[in-house]
Amino acid sequence: MEKERRVLVVFPHPDDEAFGVSGTIAAYIQQGVPVTYACLTLGEMGRNLGNPPFATRESLPKIRKAELEAAAKAMGLTDLRMMGYRDKTLEFENDEELANMVFGLIEELDPSLIITFYPGYSVHPDHEATARAVVRAVRRLPKESRPKLHCVAFSNNHEAEIGPADIVYDVSATWEQKLDTLKAHISQTAWMLVELEEQLTKNSPDLIARWHKERFWTYDWEKDKVL
């Protein structure tokens, strides 16, 4: 893993970081790289209310905020930004205003690397709106001044269209932090944590490889289709 000057992570929901990039975030922090996580919403419209349920629609925003703070602590992250947008509404936000928000973060932080979703291949409308905003913001910079853009993709057809991941990090060394990050988001992850830990005790090579590897696609500016 190349040491970066500064990393900016931009996702729309608490727990978006946990599944695919928390091991990478923890690894950068262990290297001494400053990492900022801008989380656009509190995920207050999330389907899950705990298992067994312990949240309500009214209490979920406060709970998910506390879970996000706990997840940041698990990763060792100290610069957490909660951007104040409403869950499941990002697709209806003004495109330029969202891009302005991201551009403001870029101007302030001057990251050498930005991590977000890959536009067109991240399924959820909030994911897609966030990814487009990041691309629009970075595109404002001259090509020679742009930070690297590493994207998470998980749609059904993404590898057929954009190929296999360009970057695969083995995060075995930060697995415990990743697991603690997943546990921090317990209202959303309880349904899978028991099964996951049971499976991991069996030392299945395929399962361990799945959870101990984090995959990123470098955004292809030559095929940029974001309007």
Image: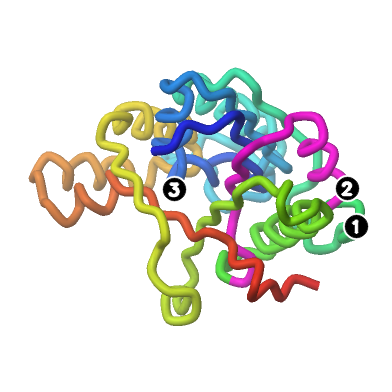
Amino acid at dot 1: Glu
Q: Which residue is mark 2?
A: 100
Left or right of residue 122: residue 169: left
Q: CA distance from mark 3 to mark 2?
A: 26 Å
Residue visible at 42% across and 21% down?
30
Question: Magenta residues, as a range?
Answer: 99-120
Residue visible at 58% across and 68% down?
123
Amino acid at dot 3: Gly
Q: Earlier in the sequence, mark 3 or mark 2?
A: 3
Q: Earlier in the sequence, mark 3 or mark 1?
A: 3
Nearer the observer, 134 or 123? 134
Q: Which residue is mark 1?
A: 96
Secondary structure beneath dot 3 equals helix
Amino acid at dot 2: Asn
Q: Which residue is mark 3?
A: 20
Q: Quadrant of residue 84?
A: top right
Residue visible at 63% across and 33% down?
37
